[in-house]
Amino acid sequence: MDTHHLVTMANEIGGFFASAADHDEAVAAIAQHLKSFWEPRMRREIVAYATAGGADLTPIVREAVLRLQVSPEPR
Amino acid sequence: MLAIDDQDLGAPPRDSRPSVTLTIDGREITVPAGTALIRAAALAGVAIPKLCATDSLEPFGSCRLCLIEIEGRKGFPASCTTPAESGMRVRTQSEPLGKLRRNVMELYMSDHPLDPFECKAGGACELHRMADAVGLVQVRYPRDGENHLALAPDDSNPYFTFDPARCILCSRCVRACDDIQGTFALTIEGRGFASQMTPGAHEHYLDSECVSCGACVQACPTDALMEKTLLERGRADRAVVTTCGYCGVGCSFKAELRGDTIVRMVPNKNGLPNHGHSCVKGRFAWGYATHPDRVRRPMVRKRISDPWREVSWDEAFAWAAAELKRVEKRYGRGAVGGIASSRCTNEEAYLVQKLVRAAFGNNNVDTCARVCHSPTGYGLKTAFGTPAGTQDFDSINQADVIVVIGANPTEGHPVFASLMKRRLRQGARLIVADPRAIELVRTPHVAADCFLQLTPGTNVALFNAMAHVVVTEGLADEAFIAARCEPREYARWREFIVAERNSPAAAERVTGVPADQIRAAARLYARGPNSAIYYGLGVTEHSQGSTAVLAMANLAMAAGMLGRPGVGVNPLRGQNNVQGSNDVGTFPHELTGYRHVSDPTLRAQFEKEWGVTLDPEPGLRIPNMFDAALDGSFKGLYVEGEDIAQSDPNSQHVAAALAAMEIVIVQDIFLNETAKFAHVFLPGSSFLEKNGTFTNAERRISRVRKVMAPLAGKEDWEVTCALAEALGYPMRYGHPAEIMDEIARLTPTFAGVSYAKLDRLGSVQWPCNEAAPAGTTVMHVGEFVRGRGRLIPTEYVPTPERTGPRYPLILTTGRILSQYNVGTQTRRTGNVAWHPEDRLEIHPHDAEQRGVRDGDWVEVTSRAGAIALRATITERVAPGVVYTTFHHPETGANVVTTENSDWATNCPEYKVTAVQVMPTARRPERLPADHVVHAASS
Amino acid sequence: MTPIPVKIFVPRDSGALSLGADGVAAAIAAEAARRGVAIKLVRNGSRGLYWLEPMVEVATGDARLAYGPVASADVPSLFDAVFLSGAPTSHPLALGPVAEIPALARQHRIVFARTGATDPLALDDFVAHGGFRGLARALELSGAALVEEVTRANLRGRGGAAFPAGVKWKTTLEQSDPVKFVVCNADEGDSGTFADRMLMEGDPLLLVEGMTIAGLAVGATRGFIYLRSEYPHALRTLMAALAAARARGYLGADVCGSGRAFDLEIVVGAGAYICGEETAMLESLEGKRGMVRYKPPVPAVAGLFGRPTIVNNVITLASVPAIVEHGGAAWNQIGYGRSRGTIPLQLAGNLARPGLVEVPFGLTLRELIHDFGGGTRSGRPLRAVQIGGPLGAYFPAAMLDLRVDYETIAEAGGLLGHGGVVVFDDTVDLARMARYAMEFCALESCGKCTPCRIGSTRGAELLDRVIRERGGAANLELLRELCDTMTAGSLCALGGLTPMPVMSALKHFPEDFGLAAAAPPP
């Protein structure tokens, strides 16, 4: 998958939820959105990117991505 | 002229105030006070002769055939214009009445062809029927008197003729154009005997303001206005009630047939979305269904560079199944997926997602709603608990303030627009928010009270500012909010919305709309008493599409404009079945009824019904599929009824993705652009060739009935079943009714839906279940589907698509009445008589700066590409904004659109592209139809 | 001491103008200048004695002496006869004191009392002659009390239908709609009628006063005068009158300081007879094609722009100030039978003394035609009289003893209509007049309803055949049926009444239709 595109998308999601008053709630909402709408291979890739530093992710999005539990690739 | 089986009661119904009881020819009848006597008589089973009266139009009183006698009154009042009163004793038959009617009819016939066989309407001609009914046997006036018999017909309209020699001046056409359609294109010119009906000021139909809705043809009692197909094919001998396959209004039609040939499509008087009205597409533009371009045999090929090879259905299925299995085996279960269509039936969309989830074993299923109203799904579900319009169409009849945002109903949803215009003529106020002065801003007898001409991409700022005014000026409906909304979230939202950055002054800087106008609109909206929002793709197809939907929901909740007739938040759905295809589970993360696949209890229910184990993780959405294809992890695709290669943005990206796949199966009625990348082509069936249901923008489920046999031998649902069977997963149904039964078993909001009920009631609006056996017209009455409504802060985030020195203008897009989306259907009909090309609308200021004159060819360049089209200079668009329609492949609007998309749903940002416009000598070569990548939306 | 200049009146009424009044006025001014005599030339309305127009009046003190008909060439001789002295002269055109001219002295002028006496453009003149007294009283009364006065007067619509104005006003008063209108029907289209024109040109402020009272009575704040385009002089006079009334606070947001609003607009028609029909007129006022509406609802309930609307004729509204000033009972005291008050009858056609005659209802046609009208102008025997405009009945000479009131004329098979009386001598062919009635209907039909739209054309064709074939039983049978159809089946009075001249001609003058002459009435 195009990691750059995934990062853009994730940051835009973060942009919406960042306005929530409570930081923890915002992080949880971002994580939940990714879990609800992103197919596992996309999540795996963004998690891998975040784990590797995730330089282009906004801090709140990086925090949310790192909370994601991703199941191993199904076969 | 009347459709088969339509009874005409002669006058429209009256709202029941006190009812009155009277006798007509000795029969007692009770009707609402104010009911015209002719209608009361019809209800009592007494038919009074008539010509100018019809129950779709207000009384007129011109023909003087329906005269009657009332005991105690002198003279012969007309029964169409005389209201029923208590205790009246009416006689419809007497010797003087008989003579009077015969003599009036004799006058008509003195200026009309005498021989019924000369009449092109044959037995359907009301004039000749009435002549029989009144017992006219001779015309004593000599034939050498003044007459209109030699007047020449007007054949200019592609679909119908007007023969003034057959016109009886009843004005039904004129009244229908005025009162039903609201276009005011027709008039009676001249006086007395010289009176003539004419479009415009003695123009031909095609040159006039006529929009070819067919209301005049429908209203005509003689053969003066006649469908050309009826003239060519003869009068029908049977009729099938079905649902239009064009836009999300979902008009009910009667397909009239002679044998197996369609003679004409006639709007169904009893159809609840349209009440007997129609537009040029549904009424007339159905000829594409039998166009020679239709593919009638399945085809396969090994490589996309190979020529197609026609094969049997069985061979095609075997080929497709083998390839899918091969790909799955090699690349994994997640390497294949399917795309369902909003053009197909609920049952077909349901089967596609079932095929993917049960037979492919993953959730990689999506639908073309992705590129149009997916933000509606996200936004309304989040705010209210269900992703659908809150009202029925007729609710607008109780609206005092109508808000139209990012929609152009007179072009895109013409039949609903007519209803809206009628309500506006009755005095409802109108707010239009649009970058472009759409027709509703000023059209005969309708003008917007507030026209907010905002910069494309700034909807959220505008809605926030309106909500800011509502809250800060004490216009919020605090009682509604306290009773109906989440208090903690409301408090948080309130804190957000009153901030200075959401004030009208701040919004003016972003949207370009003067703060005073924003305030005026907000006050008008909040004061209602009933205010209703209608919106379209101008809201959703943005990087903040979902945010904008939420912002509108916030505004409606803050003003208490939900949960009763006359209010609500209502998406105008572009395609016939956008609502339905989503309802039946075609989003990758949701099973039917918008329930997330991660819910184990829910999955268990489906697993039991389907006999398989389901994947608990959401699947790929359409744009994700393309990314995954280029990534090498997605290799096989089954696409039913959608031309993704044309309609999705970032054309080269899509083409590359499709080319990277190993098995692409396309099922469509035409060999579309996506088929260029396909290995298997399965010929589809049009809406005329199958049974099923469509669900329109008001959640109304209506039957689609097979009018003619599928050209390729199979209805689309049968094709999907056969493919599943070939994959080793049998999906066996005898009739789509059984598919609906399965949906009903699995989906609480559909639990009460069955074909038997649809046949009985005509249509139902979901939720339809034990709690609401006849369906639900207005949602969220008493409480929201999710319980309490959620107001969520909707921060305005500018689109990443920015104007600058290189691309200083914003391109936005829209549509025109006579064409539908990329024109695949409408360009294969007589509708090509209108709108021969897409034009770029540009403000005189911007044109002047660039030396562009009206009609010049211009090149439109974005960071994605360049296209050429001709310019129309107009003040409909603001300076800095250019606009085009996207119906013609030559335009190739998607060459310039970008990959930006809605943050929540990946719905593409079709509506905002930064461009430069320059004069050019370049004229695009005329390319074959469907040969160019192209913008679309549904 | 400068002597007070002598006032000389030369009418500005378009009837007088068509007979050369402007030339006479210019000649008088020139002659006075030549002789160095100071005069004040006043352009008044017409007295309605058209055979005497241009009728010049000289006022000294209270007396007004009349001369007429005056031609420009007569002016020097008038000066020679020292007509400016105010003393009676022996000039051949001398008519003596205006008030004593028999044709005027025998009238009972209430509505037209001021017409001809005053300068129609001078508001002070209007007030000096008793103007706005009705309005002054109206401002003291409630709407219901005003309606009651009009009801008590038994004032019936003078436009033609003779519908009780009080009933109409009461209906409008009772409507709860906050927006109501008063509409004056000044589309005087009947051939041979000119009362509305004469009043609007001669005493326009009376109409303003009457409409204002109507507005006060029913709670309307806006009124419209729908004026036929053929009356350019009336338009100019009305516009000046409206401007003057507005400037002096008789119209506007605060009528006479009462705090109540009423204002007027003039809308000029486009030459369609049918727009004299009240519902077609309302359509036209709304900017639409002049097509007849069906009733109910009547305009008093849903009229202009769907709002409750009083629609009354010029003379009806002009009768109101006197009724309000003197009380409805006074008005009701004069008249005949159920027709109360005075009626301005308009004599035209083949008459020695055509003009306007305002008298109480009840005189006979003979009195009207012979005593006022002076018999035929041609001197030949009178053969027919058409009463009530182009849609009225033709009566033979044998019926001249009919009384002029709504019921008597109606019982005789005719209608009084707007009060037009047109006289024909024995050269008239009633079959051609019958054909003319159909042709008129064909020309003026709005085209909405079938009996009128097609019937009138077929009727004219049929009468052509009757004339060509000198009758014919089948032709006449079909004509009778056609007339029945138009009478019973038409949407409005145009188609419904066109058979009246046709059938009355056939009944009273069968010999003109190839039939045996009718027996003289007993």
Image (spheres, coloured by chain):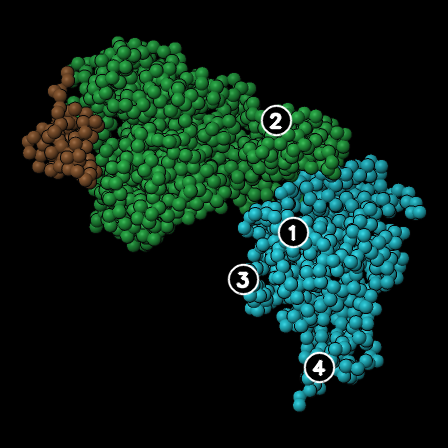
Tag of residue B473: none
Q: Tell me the subunit letter for badge 1.
A: C
Q: Could you tell me which residue is drawn at 87 percent across and 57 percent down?
A: C366
Within 10 Å of disc 3 (Cα), the crowding (few <14, some 14-19, many 20+) is few
Q: Can you say whether B261 is above or below C80 in the image?
A: above
**Do the dots labelled 1 and 2 sit on one chain?**
no
Q: What residue is pinned by disc 2?
A: B43
Q: Earlier in the sequence, mark 4 or mark 1?
A: 4
Tag of residue C259: 3
Tag of residue C169: 1
Q: What residue is pinned by disc 4?
A: C6
Within 10 Å of disc 4 (Cα), the crowding (few <14, some 14-19, many 20+) is some
Q: Nearer the viewer, residue C310 or B193?
A: C310
Distance from the alpha carbon under mark 3 to that under mark 2:
53 Å
Q: Secondary structure at mark 2?
A: helix
Task: Give the colour chain A carries in the figure.
Answer: brown
Q: What is the quadrant of the N terminus of chain A in the image?
A: top left
Task: Give the colour chain C carries in the figure.
Answer: cyan
Q: What is the quadrant of the C terminus of chain A in the image?
A: top left
Q: Tell me the subunit letter for badge 2.
A: B
Q: Nearer the viewer, mark 4 or mark 1?
A: 1
Q: Amino acid at mark 4?
A: Val
